[in-house]
Image (cartoon, rainbow, N blue to C red):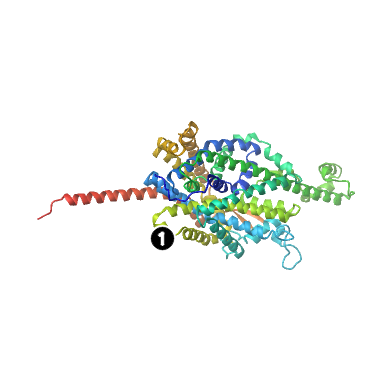
Amino acid sequence: MGKDAARAEWDNPMQFVLACVSYAVGLGNVWRFPYLCQMHGGGGFLIPYMLMLVLLGVPLFYMELAIGQKMRLGSIGAWRAISPYLGGVGMASVVTSMYLCLYYNVINAWSFWYLFHSFQSILPWAECPANSNLTGPVEECERATPTQYFFYRETLDISGSIEENGGIHMGQALCLLLAWIIVYLFIVKGVKSTGKVVYFTATFPYLVLIIYLIRGVTLHGAINGVKYMFTPKMEQLAKPTTWINAATQIFFSLGLGFGSLIAFASYNQYNNNFEKQAIVVSMVNSGTSIFASIVTFSIYGFKATFNYESCLERVRLLLLNTFDLAEDTISLENVNHWIAELNRTHPEQFASLGGRLETCDLEAELDTAVEGTGLAFIVYSEAIKNMPVSQLWSVLYFIMLLLLGMGSMLGNVIAVITPLSDLKFISHYMSTKTLNGLVCLFCLLLGLGFTTRSGNYWFTMFNDYGATFSLLFIVLIEVITVCYIYGIKRFEKDVEDMLGHRLNWYWKIMLAGVSPILLIALFIFYIVNYIQGGTPTYQAWNKELGKSVVTEYPPYAQAFIGLLLASSVCCIPLTALYTYCKKRNLASGKRERTVSTITPRQS
């Protein structure tokens, strides 16, 4: 493929690097990686994580940047240029990115909602609202917690199950509209406007993380969380799930398979040093995950210590009142001693406490693992409300979430727009602004479904099933295509043409051997795990209990999950079949025309 001089380009290599950082460093670094550390042995999880970065993440990141920069096309055009039969790989990437666009901006809408509610003298999730009779707090809030009530009832106004539909939450719909307007303004002029925006979206979250780190480590009990993170539980390394989760975290954190990296690299100058940039961005992304985890675990430590000491205080007051002891007899430091002592000296009276006596355990508080929206909008909010000047920390936190989310959204939308704009029949009739506007409007209209009362359950479905299976398959096809169909030697020559040197042994071994084997293993594990998992389930909010309960998806939702899993992957074989049939028909037509020209006329 020759060089395309007319194609728009980044103003400088730094814009490209920042665009990749802004895209790759997203919400998963803040709420997924800390959860995996907590689940898989604290600091011990860093061992499989860094190994998978070297064996899987960096080589595949490098490969996608090389393809985009060489072909100077979006995902559909780039794979079609390699082989007409592979246009479906790009189409599968576009479909998967479209699914992501539909629901990912809803998270930004939630961030706007929380940000706007942060400018109050008392944060609305700090305490339960009064009931209609003003005689006490709302019962649902009493059964749950103020932070859970604000998220599930005020923010989502969630229904009891996916089968209970309801109207659109107007507040959320307006926040979603605002989120899409901002995305459109960021991409309105294509790479020229995006290149300016990434200077802010890629750097400001680090400023907030640094501020939060300084504040976090000075909080009471923060050291308990940090020690918990860096204390390795090496027995976790013997579990296959630890290694599998490390690989999938690397895979999705870098944004492989969506077509965003190919689209970004297609705007590079032909001789840009993408090799160095692939290593830098991969390391920055992983370093950010570890850095964000230190911040998160300091907040964890503060929250766990606060809950632990609150529990001890309740037990202290219960013992003082039950056994009529002097106020200064029992302190937080000697509560456990007095529990044992009173149980020994007053066994009958102690037994009368029954279920009122709580078990306070700091380790158990730290072991409570939460990921995703539960961590971002419930656990963090609960910690923030207990900080001095909580409004300031709330505003900073949700601005950071917004910028992380918006940075990733830029990559998601560009992954859809770039391949479409490369199609001649679209670029001929539509300007860049019009195409960008129509894509954003389309995603907004479909995304309104996530703002209904059952919308969060559909959000969870898209998040769980919309991308994982298809991305594993897409990237597996990509690496097999580059190494064994296009050919590793041809790929070497392309790299030499762009960089002036050939692939070294590391890239060859990883791309031709190690990475495909790991991808096949991950793909098989996902299928086996899905089959063994039985009927798909989701967490339904039960307002009577004040907590989420595991519920099976109804049959129509299970059918929709099947559609999500198959829709993008089907693009690959169907496009190949279409191309084959088209070529066969053309060849057949040529033969018929040839025969008709040489057949003698009948007299």
Tell me residue 226's x, y (percent). Answer: 70, 41
Give the vertical position of 536 relative to 66 (above or below). Answer: below
Give the vertical position of 390 relative to 55 (above or below). Answer: below
Left or right of 576? Residue 59 is: right
**Residue type highlighted by circle 1:** Tyr
Left or right of 352? Residue 364 is: left
Tell me residue 551's x, y (percent). Answer: 58, 54
Left or right of 394? Residue 321 is: right
> Which residue does the image show at 39% across and 39% down from the upper left?
485
Q: Nearer the viewer, residue 284 or 72?
A: 72
| Numbered-mark total | 1
| Residue 562 visible in the picture | no
The quadrant in which the N terminus is found is top left
Tell me residue 418's x, y (percent). Answer: 46, 52
> Which residue does the image show at 54% across and 44% down from the upper left?
254
Q: Nearer the viewer, residue 165 or 271?
A: 271
| Residue 217 visible in the picture | yes
**Which residue is labeled 1 in the image?**
429
Q: Nearer the viewer, residue 196 or 451?
A: 196
- Outermost residue, bottom direction? 133
- Outermost residue, top direction? 505
- Outermost residue, right direction? 326
Give the vertical position of 20 relative to 431 (above or below). Answer: above
Other-residue count near label 1 (Cα within 10 Å), few / some / many at <14 / 14–19 / ≥20: few
Q: Nearer the viewer, residue 96 or 540?
A: 96
The quadrant in which the C terminus is found is bottom left
Give the vertical position of 78 relative to 456 (above or below). Answer: above
Tell me residue 173's x, y (percent). Answer: 58, 63
Q: Secondary structure at mark 1?
A: helix
Left or right of 267? Residue 22 is: right
